[in-house]
Image: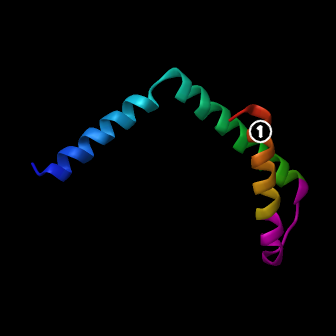
């Protein structure tokens, strides 16, 4: 096995170990909740839209994601 392959496997193991901590799981759940709330806000605001409105929709959604991330400390 090459050095690069072993190094990549080692880094993947470290990443997996860090991602499996309770703090990481809690952060993932907070982020998931923030994204869910932001999507709900976007759907409520833009009940009907056209492809011409896509920039406004994406801008609003990004704004709401940041709002909910701050609100939930995600």
**In the structure shown, which secondary structural element does the residue marked by tag 1 occupy?**
helix
- Figure quadrant of the C terminus: top right
Q: Which residue occupies the extreme bottom position in the image?
A: 52
Q: Is 28 placed left or right of 35 in the picture? A: left
Q: Residue at x 85, y 69 (%)?
A: 49
Q: Is residue 8 above or below residue 59?
A: above
How many labels, in total? 1
Q: Residue at x 62, y 31 (%)?
A: 29
Q: Is 47 placed left or right of 9 in the picture? A: right
Q: What secondary structure prevails in the magenta region?
A: helix
Say which quarter of the image contains residue 46: bottom right
Q: Per the image, is 30 magenta?
A: no
Residue 15 rendering spot, x and y as whole percentages? 38, 37
Residue 27 rendering spot, x and y as whole percentages? 61, 31
Q: Is 46 placed left or right of 73 in the picture? A: right
Q: Nearer the viewer, residue 33 or 69?
A: 69
Q: Is residue 4 above or below residue 53?
A: above
Say which quarter of the image contains residue 68: top right
Circle 1 is placed at which residue position? 70
Q: Residues within 10 Å of mark 1 (few under 14, many from 20)?
A: few
Magenta-colored span: 45-57
Residue 6 rendering spot, x and y as whole percentages? 18, 44
Q: Nearer the viewer, residue 14 or 29?
A: 14
Q: Which residue occupies the extreme top position in the image?
A: 22
Residue 19 rendering spot, x and y as whole percentages? 45, 32
């Amino acid at each position: 096995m090459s050095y690069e392959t072993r190094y990549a496997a080692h880094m993947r193991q470290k990443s997996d170990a860090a991602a499996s901590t309770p703090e990481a799981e809690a952060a993932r759940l907070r982020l998931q909740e923030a994204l869910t709330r932001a999507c709900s806000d976007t759907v409520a605001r833009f009940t009907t839209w056209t492809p011409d409105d896509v920039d406004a929709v994406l801008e609003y959604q990004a704004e709401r994601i940041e709002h909910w991330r701050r609100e939930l400390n995600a």
